[in-house]
Amino acid sequence: MAVDQTPENLRRFAEATGTTILTSQADLDPKDRAMVEMHDWCQQQGFIVVLHSGNILTSQPESRVVQNCKVVMINKGLKVGQVIAAMPSLINLLLANVDVPENQAGGDATFSVQQQRLRMLIKDALTARASDIHIEVREDVTRILFRKNGEMHLHAEWLPRLGREIASVAFNKETDSAQSHFNPLVPQDASMPLHVSGADVRLRLASMPAHGGFDVVMRILTIGNQGAPKLEDLGYTPDQVAIISKAVQLPYGAIVVSGPTGSGKTTTLASCLQMIDPRRKIFTIEDPVEKIVPNATQVAVNTDKEDRDFAAMSRASLRMDPDVIVLGEMRDLDTAKVMTSASITGHLVLSTIHTNNAVTIVTRLVDMGISASLLGDSNILVCLISQRLAPLLCQKCSIPIQKSPQHMNEMARWKEVLDLEVHNVKARVHNSNCAFCEGTGIVGRSVVAEVIWVDEAGRHFIQRGNVLGWELYLQEHGWLSLREHGVELVKAGKVDPFDAETIVGPLNHSLQHNVFDYKNQLFQNLPASTQAAIPAEVTTH
Ligand SMILES: [Zn+2]
């Protein structure tokens, strides 16, 4: 969570001009409201507010835009007052709370002021490349937070009334199922298609009552109908891409992508679909439709109606002469059964599931009620993928790890894995003045993944339910695990070692796989040959 500290530029300006920095509405003359005539122009800049008195409040007083502002005001015949430094949060509050008359709101007259504001908020989120918009409505304030690269950042503070109005407009006027009335006292969810700044955007809305108010979260699902990124652009290694490409060309079998919520599974599925031969018929069953796939028939399920739920729609799709079926998510035995029966009857199935790594996809399916011997059938599982998203370091402001005492303290622990390439490893700098990453130290995310091609030996491990032995077997055969992929990104200076550890666990291999000696409170480093002896019952070919 970003802390609202006084930025250096404001301190500098206030000192030079002998003025104070305005931090809250209480610092303003209550009669001196934001000027409606300048509102649209100020909204576009995002960091300036012109008041009735002609005073210019800005969080970037040294910007050339402030001079432009004066010119615009003079051209409009307005009196130009003083330039005053103000905290970004105050500027956002003032920009959001201007009472714009309906006919001056600009844009399409068929939209109300609040609908326009909702669009402005979503436009801001798209510009900031946020994945989610959080609206926290409380008794005294509405806080707007954006999730960017997996982390929360405060975007604006509004009056509580505005938060409530935007939430009801979103639910009552903009959603697919606008028949339901927004009630902040019960959890609600809906899907919202919008046309914002020339692009079609789809958002998923969810609300939840909270102490003193309620929360609304809007997840941005699709932006336009641009194609899904390529697997290599998401962060998959060339070897992993080669395995997945081979799997999607198969006539039948199942490809399962696992990972926690928000780990990018849906994007990976969309990228896989783009690799499928266009002469094959693709059906997707989703809840709701997230990414638009041009070469597929996409079906949204309705969980409220039994005949339109996930399993029913999946079974129905089998009668529609498909070659490829995408099951948005396997969450129960019914959908898992569709996966097995569709693969056995000669279809390629792609699906997602919630597990922490690739081998435990099997464990999860067995827990759901699919038998291990069926899962070991060579017509079913062909490729198992597990993925996370790791924050990518800003290459403009990250520093060599040797310059970060905090990182060097951990070197004893990381030495085993990072030693030889330590000169490449970079550390993240928080709250820098870097314009490139807006001081976050992060410029996007990369997939960290493990990909298993299910071979004959793998099927033996599956049938015996020996996932631990399977993982050791894979490691002995040069397989890249999630942890090792994470270590590769750290060694390449793309991911901070601390960030990598929050995603893949300790970088140090011996902490994960060797034997813990309780008597001496030590991790014993077993020789590789002893480890190999663990899955003794395994027959390999
Ligand atoms: Zn940076």
Image (cartoon, rainbow, N blue to C red):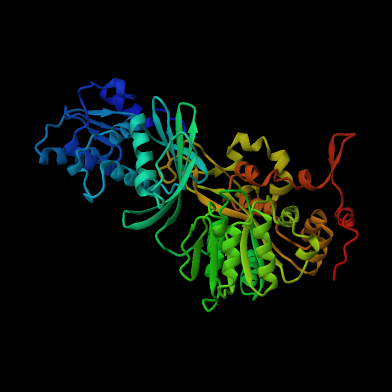
Q: Which residue is at the front of the view, 357 or 4? A: 357
Say whether residue 303 is left or right of residue 27. right
Residue 20 visible in the displayed image: no
Q: Residue at x 53, y 61 (%)?
A: 233
Q: Residue at x 27, y 36 (%)?
A: 48
Q: Position of residue 236 (x, y in %)?
A: 60, 60
Up-down: is 324 above or below 179? below
Q: Position of residue 488 (x, y in %)?
A: 65, 54
| Quarter of the picture holding the C terminus | bottom right
Up-down: is 304 above or below 84? below
For residue 168, which quarter of the picture? top left
Say whether residue 151 is left or right of residue 140. right
Q: Residue at x 82, y 57 (%)?
A: 465
Up-down: is 344 above or below 203? below
Q: Residue at x 49, y 57 (%)?
A: 290
Say whether residue 368 is left or right of residue 112. right
Q: Position of residue 97 (x, y in %)?
A: 28, 33
Residue 384 visible in the displayed image: yes
Q: Which residue is at the front of the view, 151 or 462? A: 462
Q: Position of residue 537 (x, y in %)?
A: 90, 60
Q: Which residue is at the front of the view, 256 or 404? A: 256
Up-down: is 328 above or below 8? below
Name, please, the residue furthest toward the bottom: 279
Q: Which residue is at the front of the view, 240 or 93? A: 93
